[in-house]
Amino acid sequence: MTVTVAIDCMGGDHGPEVTVRAALDFVRKHEDVCAILVGIEEKIRPFLGNAVGPRLVIRHASEVVAMDESPALAIRAKKNSSMRVALDLVKNGEADACVSAGNTGALMAISRFVLKMLPGIDRPAICAALPTVSGHVHVLDLGANVDCSPEHLLQFAIMGASLVGAIEHRERPTVGILNIGEEDIKGNDVVKRAVELLKDSELNFVGNVEGDGLYKGEADVVVCDGFVGNVALKVSEGLAQMLAVFLRREFGRNLLTRLAALIALPAIRHFKHRVDHRRYNGASLLGLRGIVVKSHGSADVFSFGNALDRAANAVRSGVLERISLRVTRQAGPRAIQENV
Amino acid sequence: MTVTVAIDCMGGDHGPEVTVRAALDFVRKHEDVCAILVGIEEKIRPFLGNAVGPRLVIRHASEVVAMDESPALAIRAKKNSSMRVALDLVKNGEADACVSAGNTGALMAISRFVLKMLPGIDRPAICAALPTVSGHVHVLDLGANVDCSPEHLLQFAIMGASLVGAIEHRERPTVGILNIGEEDIKGNDVVKRAVELLKDSELNFVGNVEGDGLYKGEADVVVCDGFVGNVALKVSEGLAQMLAVFLRREFGRNLLTRLAALIALPAIRHFKHRVDHRRYNGASLLGLRGIVVKSHGSADVFSFGNALDRAANAVRSGVLERISLRVTRQAGPRAIQENV
């Protein structure tokens, strides 16, 4: 099976310089993949050399969705944007997945408009992996939905478990819900009701996960509303950046500490690799009738390449079929109940 | 002026071993403080030696609120708990502040029951300081209120600004609201309406602060509901612990890396001191008619001592009066409007 990925080459802080270079590495690394480079041809070509071939083609798209553009406007007014054309390719079956480092809100809105939702799923959710002490955890939603119902959280859990089940070949990944610890005030109403739904579901539900439990690897999948998820993600980014600044400051303090840093370099390098957020780049937009992966806007070639790998993996492992199957299974008893 | 602090000696994971020792250091360090050691006398005395005197007295209390006890039960059934007696001392004016490392939910509920709320404040909030790249930030609420109205968030902002104004002698500390970044979905309804209230207030409101902005020091005070605040705090704790584990693992890998760690020790020590959460121990329970500080349950002597210092500082700087004054000022125009 060949996996074809449509790449929005114009998105992100660096545009084709990063996206096209990453695409080159991507087709070199995997024999079973094709890349369709979508965007303004004359901006793409300089980074391509003579590499165009059957596994690497350009699809010209004359417009670009700006990073701060209104999603509604992007849908209405930019029908020939690189983002829109890449998603159209997924819609009409020319591509199996779309990857973009562009405007998240626009990517979400256009994906929903072009691809539509999977049956049984009300809203798309943003899902990404984070490192934990023992491996990693998939968290969703990371910002697509600020207000969620308990049913939405259940759907997120089903989608997250399907994703992990597919890409990591785990039959019953554990699922937790992000919550707070005080016994008497445990969770708001939505979370409390979601807990009941999750307990009654077919999922391998392990209960509440507190903020610190996220990084302790207490569950393979953790669900939360998009507001809380986005805050958790951004707080983590901010804290990691601050600690890096402090470490650099301490090791840069004087000649002796700089020498110490030099000697400690191999250990520090291992550490940096271990927690390198670029390795975790590529958030899945789940719930759509098609595979869409959002890269961080600031991604470099290595980082964007990981988002491409993530998209190809999702295709190979049949994530969409898994989600559909699980949603149908979950809806089963309820549908019967409703008929009674 | 003498500052008298009532210490719930039985609370926390370590009880009198930590709390009494910290109290000894506390009265030795500050000439203007007295400590009332509240709890089971025969458990307190062994850690005290001959140190009892006019500035260090024991107040026997026969019961202990367990860490997992229901707050409602603790109020009803344990009228002679160390926590309750310590708060009664604040209520009747024998002490200026209460510090406890016990059950947070119970401390919150008993404080509210015994001390009552300040006029104009509907709910208490938990406020703590976190380090930032350039200093620190006070965040509230960290878990007392899972569901908040826009008016509650405004009250939190007033209380936080009053606290920072008082203890750091800053007339107009900056205030932000924790929010998420996507333009079109910026914030849920409550946050959006709170932003309007904050803009119309007398506060030095700087707008939205995203998760990563918290650690960048984008505001002196950041408000959020207790669910989001608790998740942000715990996620930070979890990430910091994970990074520490990874660093230790890398430096412990072999003889060479262990040697490197030894050489890097001074820099690592500085770094650890810089981000030592024990230095930030002591969360203020704001909004009550009395000063109550909650220590982390796992606090050691150094850490609990910081919570004691924080309580004494709050008394010295007149935090309660500041909050009352600001609430009255804020309510002013509204009260007039309501009369018209």
Image (cartoon, coloured by chain):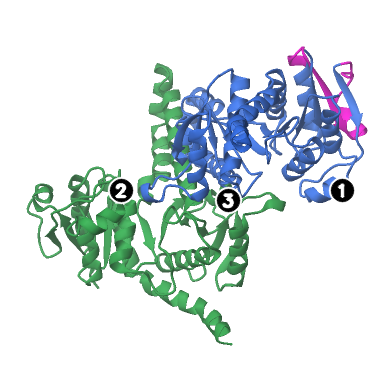
Chain colours: A green, B blue
Amino acid identity at mark 2: Ser
Whole-percent x, y for residue B56 in the image: 85, 20
Q: Is residue B162 above or below residue B69?
A: above
Q: Residue at x 76, y 20 (%)?
A: B25
User: Residue A213: which numbered mark, if any?
Assistant: 3
Question: CB under 8 Å between callouts 1 and 3?
Answer: no
Q: Are marks 1 and 3 on the same chain?
A: no
Q: What segment is highlighted magenta in the picture? A: B28-54
Q: Which is more toward the observer, B76 or B131?
A: B76
The image quadrant where one finds the C terminus of chain A is bottom right
Whole-percent x, y for residue A257 in the image: 43, 21
Amino acid identity at mark 3: Gly
Q: Is residue A274 left or right of residue A337?
A: left
User: Residue A303: which numbered mark, if any?
Assistant: 2
Q: Is residue A9 visible?
A: yes
Question: CB under 8 Å between callouts 3 and 2?
Answer: no
- Front label number (2 vs 1): 1
Q: Are marks 2 and 1 on the same chain?
A: no
The residue that disc 1 covers is B76
- Marked residue chain, label 1: B
